[in-house]
Image: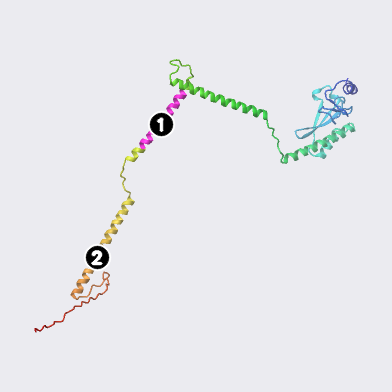
Amino acid sequence: MHSDDVVWDTLGNRQFCSYKITTKTQNFCRNEYNLTGLCNRSSCPLANSQYATVREEKGRCYLYMKTIERAAFPRRLWERVLLSKNYEKALEEIDENLIYWPRFIRHKCKQRFTKITQYLIRIRKLTLKRQRKLVPLRRKIERREKRREEKALIAAQLDNAIEKELLERLKQDTYGDIYNFPIHAFDKALQQQDAESESESDAEKEDDDDDEDMDKREFVEADDSDLSDFEDMDKLETSSEEELEEEEEVEKKASHSKSKGKTPLKGPARRKRPYIEIEYEKETEPTTKTKAA
């Protein structure tokens, strides 16, 4: 038989309760179904067979109710009712579901629902505002990674130095016919040597090609445009020579017609030339008669 007074006397006063937190002023309860958060007779969810509370899950409020009829079935002990998002409608739903319950539980459920609604509103406002995000600096991890990087760098340099030294000794035949080295190191060294020889041969070929280019002479066929330019120049020269010959013939004809007393030819070939008069002066010495004495 389930007795609330026996449970409260056992847990609240005499024996240990895992949900109870004792302080200097009063005792608190950590049970998730506690209505007020205080450890007392009316608020204890374990010592009350008829109990109700309000909880928030993922932004929605639920009304949880426990009755004595379901005490023998722990799987169906709590009845959950989803409350409306509207504040007034949710209060009406609490009154409807807890109509015959004690006034203390009904009043505390409304008070708890009001507090939950207020902090949900504050959460929505804070998420909309821009906030600073504090990022912790993990100094210990950073120092550890830095030390590992330094060790890895030293080990890599040491491995490279050992590999180079072994390859040099191999080239010098220090160990004779005894070879106990990894094959991939030899393959790598051979590839490097082939690459160096190829680069040197390419450089030599380029130098030879440059020298050959300097010695070679080539004759290039002229373009049609160049030939047309030369033809135009020839035409201009021939036309200028013909014009000069025509002018000379016209001058000869004009001089010949003047000498014969004929009128000069009329036409476009006639050219006006300035008329020049030439005067000659002759000096004569007077004859003197010499008388013989």
Residue located at (28% from left, 61% from top): 240
In the displayed structure, would residue 144 be above or below residue 113?
above
- What residue sits right under mark 1 in the picture? 200
Residue 238 lies within the magenta run: no
- What residue sits right under mark 2 in the picture? 246
Residue 247 location, x and y as percent? 25, 66
Residue 190 lies within the magenta run: yes
Residue located at (54% from left, 24% from top): 158
- Is 143 situated left or right of 172 in this image? right
The mark total stands at 2
The three-letter code of the residue at mark 1 reads Glu
Q: How far apart are marks 1 and 2 (CA)?
A: 73 Å
Residue 143 location, x and y as percent? 65, 28
Q: In which quarter of the image is residue 156?
A: top right
Residue 291 location, x and y as percent? 10, 84
Number of residues whose C-alpha sits closer than 10 Å to that of mark 1, classed few (under 14), some (14–19) or many (20 or more) = few
- Is 9 situated left or right of 163 in this image? right
In the displayed structure, would residue 81 be above or below residue 260?
above
Residue located at (59% from left, 27% from top): 150
Q: At numbered mark 2, what does the secondary structure look like: helix, strand or loop?
A: helix
Of 72 and 3, the residue lying toward us: 3
The three-letter code of the residue at mark 2 reads Glu
Of 230 and 103, the residue lying toward us: 230
Residue contact at pointers 1 and 2, CB within 8 angstroms: no
In the displayed structure, would residue 241 be above or below residue 177?
below
Q: Which quarter shows the N terminus?
A: top right
Q: In which quarter of the image is residue 213?
A: top left
State the predominant SS element of the stretch in magenta. Answer: helix
Q: What stretch is highlighted in magenta?
A: 186-209
